[in-house]
């Protein structure tokens, strides 16, 4: 078990006075299987009243507007979370059985359809189908497909952007966790496995000392439906989801769970800034 304190600072520097901005933030984790939120708080500057709610996908959302002139928007989300290993059932499920199970609920049907972000190139579809054909167990195939996608794409910042698609990342064979997750989702959905995008944080140092603060970043991974449960996997790092992963939100792709999104009235041009600090407290 890890007890992690996460400080996520983000916002925008604007090119002049902004007269009004309207925003949504998804930066606070939720209590769920494997994690318990002990404390969470979101500070917004300039000071603004905000409305909090849980969206359709189960993410905590802070919606706020600032109607006074400002040159900068700054948010600081602070959370203390206990995270445990996520054991998963090793029971198998056949392809026909999975198809029947996936058609029973809206939650799984919605995670079968490709989006503009996840729509995979032909090579990825062929890769997924080839791997799927080798396995009678859909769950084992899902793990192999996710691992193959992660192996095929080199993690590299600066090659893709926040709006990049799976097809664009595959063309470079390079990208960040968001791109690799989108490619894995596209591959899994291409063979009929419901799969969803997960956003959160990953403590980057497995052997961190208690009290040690390290630089972190937002992270993304995938979960797929196994008939009775959803199983997570981190294709970027080729690891199971464990006590260093902190979940913030789930959705069809990144568009459903961006940390900060909004519109503003004012001069054209803004610069995003992001800093994440993670401290192991126990």
Image (tube, rainbow, N blue to C red):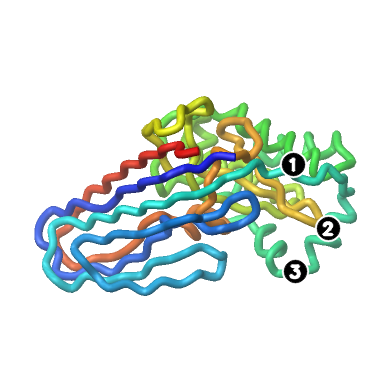
Q: Mark 3, residues whose alpha carbon is within 10 Å: few (<14), some, or many (≥20)?
A: few
Residue drawn at x 71%, y 64% is 109
The span from disc 3 to disc 2 (Cα, nearest Å) is 11 Å
Q: Position of residue 270 (x, y in %)?
A: 21, 52
- Specify the quadrant that holds the N terminus: top right
Q: Mark 2, residues whose alpha carbon is within 10 Å: few (<14), some, or many (≥20)?
A: some
Q: Say what secondary structure mark 1 lies in.
A: helix
Q: Position of residue 168 (x, y in %)?
A: 49, 40
Q: Position of residue 206 (x, y in %)?
A: 53, 28
Q: How many marks?
A: 3
Numbered label attached to residue 105: 3
Q: Say what secondary structure mark 3 lies in.
A: loop
Residue nearest the observer in this picture, 161 or 76: 76
**Above-or-below relation of 88 to 47:** above
Residue drawn at x 37%, y 33% is 213
- CB under 8 Å between discs 3 and 1: no
Residue drawn at x 38%, y 67% is 62
- CB under 8 Å between discs 1 and 2: no
Horizontal side, residue 12 vs residue 217: left or right: left
Name the residue tied to disc 2: 99
Of callouts 3 and 1, the N-terminal one: 3
Numbered label attached to residue 142: 1
Horizontal side, residue 69 vs residue 183: left or right: left
Numbered label attached to residue 177: none
- CB under 8 Å between discs 3 and 2: no
């Amino acid at each position: 078990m890890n007890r992690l304190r996460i400080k996520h600072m983000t916002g925008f520097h604007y090119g002049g006075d902004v007269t009004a901005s309207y925003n949504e933030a998804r930066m606070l984790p939720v209590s769920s299987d494997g994690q318990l939120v002990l404390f969470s708080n979101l500070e917004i500057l300039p000071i603004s009243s905000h409305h909090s709610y849980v969206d359709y996908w189960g993410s905590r959302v802070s919606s706020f507007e600032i109607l006074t002139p400002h040159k900068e928007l700054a948010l600081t989300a602070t959370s203390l979370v206990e995270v445990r290993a996520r054991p998963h059932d090793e029971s198998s499920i056949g392809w026909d059985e999975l198809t029947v199970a996936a058609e029973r609920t809206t939650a799984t049907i919605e995670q079968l359809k490709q989006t503009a972000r996840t729509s995979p190139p032909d090579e990825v579809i062929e890769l997924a189908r080839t791997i799927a054909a080798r396995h009678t167990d859909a769950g084992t195939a899902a793990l192999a497909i996710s691992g193959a996608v992660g192996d095929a794409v080199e993690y590299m910042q600066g090659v893709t952007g926040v709006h990049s698609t799976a097809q664009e990342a595959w063309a470079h064979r390079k990208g960040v966790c968001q791109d690799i997750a989108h490619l894995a989702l596209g591959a899994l959905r291409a063979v009929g496995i419901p799969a969803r995008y997960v956003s959160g944080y990953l403590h980057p140092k497995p052997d961190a000392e208690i009290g040690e603060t390290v630089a972190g970043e937002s992270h993304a991974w995938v979960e797929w439906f196994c008939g009775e449960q959803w199983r997570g996997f981190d294709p970027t790092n080729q690891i199971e989801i464990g006590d260093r992963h902190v979940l913030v939100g789930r959705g069809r792709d990144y568009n459903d769970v961006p940390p900060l999104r909004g519109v503003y009235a004012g001069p054209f041009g803004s610069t995003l800034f992001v800093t994440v600090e993670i401290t192991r407290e126990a």
